[in-house]
Image: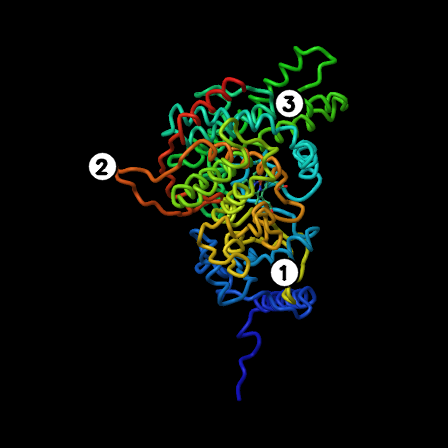
Amino acid sequence: MDFPSSSSAFSPPLALLACLLLASLSWSSVRWRRRTRGRPLPPGPPRLPVVGNLFNHPRVKRWVPYHELCSRYGDVLYFSVMGQSILVLDSARAVHELLEKKAANTSDRTQSPMIELSGSSLNFGFMPYGQRWRRHRRAFWQHFNQGAAVAYWPAQRASAHQFLWKLLRDASRFREHIRYTYAGVILKVGFDIDVGDEDDRYVAAVDAALEGPVQGLVPGTFLVDFLPFLRYVPTWFPGATSQRLWAKWQAAAETLKNLPYDHVKAALDQASNDEEPRSIIGKLIQQITAVEPGARHEEEEIVKNVGAITFEAGLDTVYITTLAVFLAMTMHPAVLKKAHAELDRVVGPDRLPDFSDQDALVYVNAIVKETLRWHPVLPLGLPHCTVEDDELDGYFVPAGTVVIPNIWACMRDPEMYDEPEEFRPERFIHDGKLDPAVRDPAALVFGFGRRICPGRYFAQAGLFITVASVLHVFDITSPLDDHGRPVQITHGMEDGLSSHLSDYRCTITARSAEAEALILAHTRQS
Ligand code: HEM
């Protein structure tokens, strides 16, 4: 048999290239085997060479298709998109195994150009796991831990009362009223600013700054997520509409960082030296005055960021959850009737609910829990990221893997919650008390490990007092059509990092003339 001579088949440079390629492939394969130690990657849909799952990775309302795929592959699901490993955890068990037990290795965040371009660099929720994130989180937690959060109850109560009065005056604008209620509390406790009735410039600054994260952080919305060089196209370039949008978002984030901060700074400058600052930002500014001037700029930046993130992370979450309570009451009149009965019995007609009623208002607490479960506002949480190679259930999890907890799926696990699609607060109650045997949705919807939501105590207190106050004095019923007939509405979740409701129309009326009088009396007092 004739073999072609080596000189005719391969020229020396080509042969060298082939040898180098072969050597590099064998070296990668050895390294891969060393790293995996024979452990396979977790199961998942079939992958194409190079692009992996680019064409079969879910894109819309991913919590649903992820969950459907898990019924085929199990509660740990693996994708690889253009070399990026993605792991979906579809059960409380899997989430606990990786994000709680191995928190030291799974508390990083993946970085995307859209974080900066959407104006979210100030948000430590997106910062990589490390010293900078830690310093931000420490400053925040100091003022929002369980003990500290109690100090904000009076402001939360006053804001809830103001909300009742606004609903009484014009219930058709209940969505704006909810936003003002929660933004007002943050402005008060964070900056000692009293929010205006409407057209408040601080609330306008918050709304403008939230546009970037809400629209810009939905994965895959902007091509720059896949082609990072696009961020350098100048704004004057024809068709560079995204660039102009990003510039607007970043400017709005800067305004949010500086506007309320400057107010606090000015107030501190005018106050006498022995006066204790009343606001969180005031206290943080006071702490950094002792810092050496050289390091002060960095510290000042942290304080500004902490102020801004309180709005960025703390407004839409409670706003959407409160809207979901209104929707649930509209759809389930029997639940509202039971809440009314409990409030009449525990609180009575002569006053509004208070935090001291919380233990006795078992059904109202159960409504808040059921709403957090029924409409988990961050259905996929905030994705974590692994730092080093890891292992789960005997599978290999490479370093740099994006880990997505499917909180929505956990909240609909029929093993944990019977008939999960139903809105049924009773599931949390046994013998007239909250049942410790039923998992509290708060143990999952606020996230995991070292990244668990540090605003959770503040959020839950605000939700409780607002919901209890509204249900005590208002009826919430179906919206009416043009002929005055009730319209049947259903629960739907919109796509997005935080999921808005598809429909939230309702009719809100005071329960009685006494209820109206009660609202007016309390508004005058607060
Ligand atoms: C219903 C209300 C809320 C829900 C369901 C919620 C849920 C979450 C979730 C799922 C995370 C990601 C946790 C993780 O990575 O595992 C998170 C992070 C965060 N939340 Fe909340 N949250 C709520 C309200 C608030 C409020 C009111 C504040 C501020 C006052 C707040 C501040 C934060 C911050 C600063 C982070 C970033 C934590 C970090 O990455 O270290 N949240 N939240």
In space, the residues marked 3 and 1 are separated at their CA atoms by 44 Å
Going by the numbered disc 2, the residue's amino acid type is: His
Reading the image, the residue beneath label 2 is 483
Q: Quadrant of ligand 1?
A: top right
Reading the image, the residue beneath label 1 is 397
Of the two numbered discs 2 and 3 on the same chain, state the one appearing first in sequence. 3
Q: Is mark 1 within 8 Å of ligand 1?
A: no
Q: Residue at coordinates 67% horizontally, 59% vertically from top-left?
A: 390
Q: Tell us which disc is closer to us: 3 or 1.
A: 3
Going by the numbered disc 3, the residue's amino acid type is: Ser
Q: Is residue 482 left or right of residue 174?
A: left
SS at mark 3? loop
Near-viewer residue (130 or 65)? 65
Reading the image, the residue beneath label 3 is 279
Mark 2 neighbour density, 10 Å: few (under 14) some (14–19) many (20 or more)? few
Q: How is the image coloured?
A: rainbow
SS at mark 1? strand
